[in-house]
Image (cartoon, helix red, strand yellow):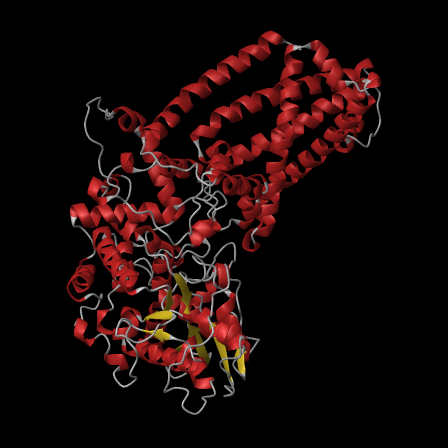
Amino acid sequence: MSPIITGLLIVVAVSFFIMTMSGRTGVLLGLKGENRLDNIPFRINALLRFGLGQKRMVDPEEFTPGMMHVFIFAAFLVLQVRSLMLFSMGFSESALVLFSDLSHPFWLENPGVLGAYRAYLLVKDVVAALAVLGVLYFCFLRAKVKPDRMTPSWEAYLILGFIGGLMVTEFLFGGSHMVEQNGGFVWWEPVTSTVGLGMNALGHTGAYVLGRIGFWMHLSIILAFLNFLPLGKHFHIITGLPNVFFQRTRASGKLGTPNLEKEEFGTATVKDLTWKQGLDLYSCTECGRCQTHCPTYITGKPLTHKGVNQDLKHWIWDHEQWVEEGYSASGVKEPLPEIIGSALKAETVWACTSCGWCETACPVFIENIPRLIDMRRYQVQVKAEFPQEIQRVFEGIERQGNPWGIGQDRRDEWAEDLHLPTWGDGGGPYEYLFFVGCAGSYDDKQKKVSRSLVKILREAGVSFATLSKQEMCNGETARRMGNEYLYQTMAKMNVEAWNGLGVKAVITQCPHCFNTIKNEYPEFGGEYRVISHTELINELLKDKRIKLSQVMNTKLTYHDPCYLGRHNGVYDAPREVLKAIPGLEVVEMQRSKREGFCCGAGGGRMWMEEHIGTRINHNRVNEAALTLQHASNPSTPFPDATDKQKPGMVGDYKEKGGSGVVAVACPFCSTMLRDGVNDTGREENIKVKDIAELVADAMETKPGGAATVTPGPAVHAKPE
């Protein structure tokens, strides 16, 4: 071939690549530090499963496009070796002869090596053909199906052209040698030899010319592709695997804890991002999977995590010198502008419900929620700029220990006639602290859930006590709203009090309390065994410490709370409890379990108004009504919740049909769904009930069982 042309192509391409990458890497090196080298075995395992193994690409909602992506990814891995061979052929005629002619003396003298090489060629041929299939599929998907999650893009077609071109030129180059050697079909290169058979019609000269064109096009595409990667969304080909390796090792519901004494008050400018958050931006594939069940996107809010990633990434790329060296576009050294106002709008940052779908769906493990919460922290703690309605929430927690601002002396009114033991009153010892929570203490509907849970615990003989008037908010709401100082104040105060009382295990009826106490309190010394009320009830049923005999002849659908299900993996326990209730016909909503749709209350949104788009809780109630109606009348149209062109259509159901119960396991979900039922005029047909209420109503009560508290055997949550 030509060493001069090959060398010139490499020098020019690599020089441009280094120039581009110097700016990209310079920005990352200039961002805040963060330790992502802990738990190396976990990271290696994650890289193998989710990076090289592409496990998330074939999730159920996107299985077919995921498999096509796997085909292309496999081809990239396998053809890297082939590409090195082709470059060596460009430099050396001897390499060209060696790799192209399997009758070369080297192969005859080394039959074992020849066998391995043939096996590689077979794998190469198969994956390259599958990659062509993948390219054709994605072209069809974009041109004809036009999925909602995919943004129309000329870049996508260019990259698909590059990928398809690499595969086709590989076949043409290999096929030309088949013609030259008068070869026929061979098993170790089935596609290439078939192409060669077709090229026989061109004659030796025609096949030779077409093969050489294919060779130089292949090298040129590789080098052009290399330089295009850092300029667009396909940068993830370089950064995706590292991003998977550097994923967080903690639970998704656990936020990082800034050091307030060191004035870590949140994210103001892009320089306040960590290098991992910058790598997240580089790694966004723009696949749009984060949108398919995103409550804000589905209901028309000004937030898509794909959009946030792109807005931030392109702002950084457009201002690399400013970010890296401090010089603005005008050449003047000046501070960077704040993210909100330059790259993002305030309403975008405040729209997120922190439901976690985007992070669950992302194939490269981009962490969107912590970044947005950090921006909220700055807005609250430094700028004092936040939605007006949450001011009273902060004041309520500060002054009365609850977001409603109701007097602390009324915290135990819900249980005045129950004569509950109070931890630290000289009784006990108690196995569990029943952390009632603010909603369970003050919200009229949730008080009934608290009483139902007490009835169950007493009937099962569970040893527990409450803190009565001494109980305080755990601070979760304040933290998700950005008031980190208030959260840390509440957390430290609670941990100090509970540790002083010797608390070892905690029961919660609120997933937000559950997540905070379980995953976030350990950073302040609060190491407790935390169990949600649905897990506990399920264990009591399995241990036959309670018995359900009251028949409930009704249809029921269960709504997964995001902070119980998606963030903490508790999906089965609530369903097992519901199935144990006689007479209940449990039907699943399409968006359930891992794909569950948010009620709209998370991330502090419980306390904020929805001024834009449709209400999230209305969308969810519509789906619940449609699910119940379809269960009664299967002829009712039931659109696919993951429809590629218009996802979320199950939430568009406006008819009054559907009757039964929507079961919940979260006070926030209960409030939002009850409001949604009332707002949509379905209160006569649909009732919203907590699982504890349903169990208490169905439970047999032993004589005196609800009036005494006796120690029972330990009940533990199943390991997750």
Q: Is residue 347 above or below residue 544?
A: above
- Residue 611 visible in the snapshot: no
Camera-side residue: 647 or 201?
Answer: 647
Camera-side residue: 606 or 676?
Answer: 606
Q: Is residue 98 left or right of residue 706?
A: right
Residue 478 rendering spot, x and y as whole percentages: 25, 57
Snapshot quadrant of residue 710:
bottom left
Q: Is residue 74 above or below residue 60?
A: above
Q: Is residue 560 above or below residue 286?
A: below
Residue 293 rendering spot, x and y as whole percentages: 45, 57
Quadrant of image for the N terminus: top right
Extreme residue in the bottom direction? 703
- Residue 665 visible in the snapshot: yes
Q: Is residue 232 above or below residue 408?
A: above
Number of marks in picture: 0
Residue 169 rendering spot, x and y as whole percentages: 66, 26
Residue 505 rendering spot, x and y as whole percentages: 38, 65
Residue at point 60%, 42% (across, down): 70
Snapshot quadrant of residue 211:
top right
Residue at point 30%, 26% (across, down): 324
Snapshot quadrant of residue 51:
top right
